[in-house]
Amino acid sequence: MRSHRWLAASAAGVFALGIAACGSNDESPSGGTSSGSSSGSAKQGGTINGAGATFPAPIYTEWAARFKDQTGTTINYQAVGSGGGIAQFTAGTVDFGATDAPMKDEEEQAAQKKGAPVHVPTVLGAVTVSYNVSGIDKGLKLDGATIADIFLGKIKKWNDPAIAKVSGNTSLPDKDITVCHRSDESGTTKNFTEFLADYSPEWKSGPGVDKTVKWPTGTGAKGNDGVAGCVKQTDGAVGYVEQAYALQNNFTTAAVKNKEGQFVAPSLEATSAAGAAASPPADLRFSTINAPGAKAYPISAVTFLLVYQDMCKAGMNATQAKLVKSWLDYALGAGQEIAPQLQYAPLPDSVKTKAKAKVAGLQCNGAAVGSS
Amino acid sequence: MTTLPAVSGRRRVTDSGMRALMLVLTLIAIVPLVLILYYLIKEGIGAWSKDFFTTDPTGRFLGNPGGIKSAIWGTIEMVALASLIAIPIGIGVALYLVEYGKQGRFANVVRYFVDVMTGVPSVVFGLFVYIVLVVTKVGGTFAAWKGSVALALLMLPVVTRSAEVVLNLVPDSLREGALALGAPRWRVVFRVVLPSALPGLVTGSLLAVARAAGETAPLLFTAAFVFGTQFDLSQRMNSLPLQIFSDVGQAQDRLVQRAWGAALTLVLLVLILSLVARLAQRRSRLA
Amino acid sequence: MEAGSLTARGGRTLPERSPRARAIDPLLRWTLTGLAALILLLIGFFFIRLFIEAKPAFDKFGYVGFVFDNNWDVSREIFGAWPLVVGTLITSAIALILGVPVAIATAIYTTELSPRHLRQPLTIIVELLAAVPSVVYGLWGIIVLAPKLKGPEQWFSDTFSFLPLVGGPVSIPNCFVAGLIMAIMILPIVSAISREVMVTVPSENKEAALALGATRWEMIRIAVLPYSRSGISGAAMLGLGRAIGETIAVTIVIGNAPNVPDSIFSQGYTLAAVIANEFGEAASDPTHRAALIAAGLVLFVLTLLVNAIARHFVNRAQRGERTVPKGMAG
């Protein structure tokens, strides 16, 4: 009987803890570290939930840490992939979404139930073709057609004549190529396949261009980090990962042939060059893949944050809307200065102006955000 | 008087050979466990530190990746809620089957369905809770209590089945004695049957709890994943299995090491629960 | 013993005989019956709800089409689950082929051959395998096991390439590793049930065999195994059911490629893994979501079938079908 009571008492204790916590409706996670969460009167505090692309996750999480220090607001960013970001944004389970692939028309239509989605471009990044082959140094020259053939499974070995021809490297090792690709819906995939489709009709009519395609060969992994892990694990592997992930893991990356015929290695300058010529339409749904310019890296991609034009009508309360807007202001303001530290290119001025105008035009129940 | 046939050489060889084979295969069965424990300890201990247990994962790419504090608390809280749901209901159903239903048609149907439930993959439970609770936005979208519901669905048949076995072991003479003395049925149940079966019930419940603590799939689309520690059951909550699953595919070595550390923590938690369950079983006067 | 509270000791602890106290009896009875009925309602609701949500996919692709079409193409919104079904079957088959013999051997060894004092420790060690969570198996599998196996797999693939489903390039995450991990995971349950069944073999059968001069192994072969056949089959089917539904460990080590695998050493995909991987993105796409739920339904039905068969076998064993071993009948 005694042990029975003790068991019941401890169970009740945990239950009581849970109920008490429920009642307090504690919104701000404790975060463990002591910095920043002391909500002085100047700090706005609060929590914002976001989900989406893994492509910009390195810079977003860096921004989130600094934003919290500055304003006390916690950004809970879940890197679940662009597809997951769009899905959660449409379902209303997050305050903002993030995607490297602008929403398709059908996706925008599905979101219309809550309101008009707004794409806010934030930074540009480079989709590197990273490989892990002992025997090949960095800077292997590749072009779109060859890369497409590798990912189609037509080129199976590193010393294939096609690779030797385009790269000019005659001492390639006799190793099997292991392809690493995404298993989840990814904006990075959409940008990468867009590039491939430009140079390979077989790719265009086959797997096609989308956030997820029917990969003819290779291993699927979740997120940019998963593909990076896949590449790192296998000798002979090749995969497409964002620049920050490649740098962090010391991957060797290919120099890819761009529109002007130049082989360009992914770098901050090359990414910025790709963005320089961008002239986005009014809804800011644009792509920088295969951008013109001799110095441009051809697989540079712009990434977006998604919010609703009228955030409150979509389900947010006014305070939350203010927090989200301040986060967007940060991204387009101080955040742009920090981006180069992680090799993300800030937006070209023309795009930045348009983006800022979009953010200024966001509304809460008909009035401008923050006016209440 | 017949003489027993002598054992031929061939038969003797077959006998020794097969016995050796059985031993070898048994040892082979043990090898994976040894290897897993070895790697868990080797890689996991390296991740353990005070910070590991007292800081949340930060999700930061550069800089401090943080520890697993939110995961540990999340697991504890969600599993506790799941147990609070599943254990009373499970024991209740078992009581029905043993005390009232016995071999009746309704009881047999219930038994059959409980058996069915044990075979359902955990991901399908998560799917079900997702459809019924998350999509329909009952009380918000992703929430820890919904994850607990999915876990409870998983635990229910396990608790019921083991409880039924244990309750059946309570000798009828005890029940009849109490009834003969004029005790009402409910008192017999609560004062005689349950206390006698208690250690066995504890064992079964703890094993179910251990199983729930290790489950990932039901939580993927119900409690979702979040970095910070918070005790609010109506919000998303982190948990050890989800944290491990999130870290496992990463390229960064220190994140993989965090996964090992979290895995060691989880396995220790499950092992301790299982051990306590077994100890309770030893103390049982019935088994 | 709690009987103390029920003996007559000065009247205070005598059970209540008043009608009021007994009124609680029906209350208890109906509460418990209600709980039991709740289970039935829950399962019914479960199945119906899953079916309703899955129906759009079945409507679009047909029941047969959904299961047997070999094309899981998310971007084109074509959902034929055959690659997933094949992946599930292949990995489960590997799990059974590798896991069941070892489990049976373990059961035989611990019940019949091992020294008495080792019986309990060995049993506990095998059961400890069940305590390791699925995600930890996945972690160990992809980081430790899969890379180490690549070499031997490549050798096997090259040497035995004439066999069906063998030959060609070997990838690190592949179907075989998934099957192997699942074999380890089903070991404890198959072993435990086999052990339970073998322990119930009447000792008369065993002693009779030994008395007639059988060696130890022959005794097992003649008296124990035939008697336990139903139970072992049931155990194997239960293991199969568990393997079919295994999600997390599989998705970590199988490579997640929705194609019918050319060889057991290439990547694959299973019904359970696809649900876990694609669910996050399917939330707002009705067709995709319906397809995933349909995959879950197929999975559910498969496990139902397998478990029903398992139960049939285990029940037969418990009723002691085989009392006279075939070899001794004549």
Image (tube, rainbow, N blue to C red):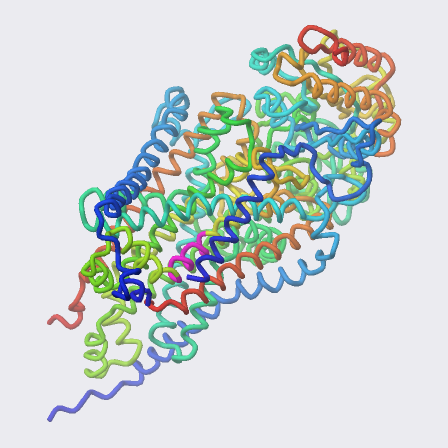
- Residue C303 seen by the camera: yes
Give whichever of A165, A370 is nearer the camera: A370
Q: Position of residue B180 (x, y in %)?
A: 18, 60
Farthest residue to the bottom: give it: B1
Tell me the residue at 69%/36% (across/down): A224
Q: Which residues are magenta?
A: B199-208
Give whichever of C256, B123 is nearer the camera: B123
Image position of C153 (left or right of A359): left
Judge whether A183 appears above or below C321 on screen: above
Image position of B151 (left or right of A108): left
Tell me the residue at 17%/71% (across/down): C327
Q: Position of residue A311 (x, y in %)?
A: 67, 14
Tell me the residue at 46%/30% (across/down): C292
Tell me the residue at 45%/36% (across/down): C83
Image position of A317 (left or right of C227): right
Judge whether C26 appears above or below A256 on screen: below
Query: Magenta includes B205?
Result: yes
Q: Position of residue A319 (x, y in %)?
A: 71, 19
**Which image quarter holds the N terminus of chain C?**
bottom left
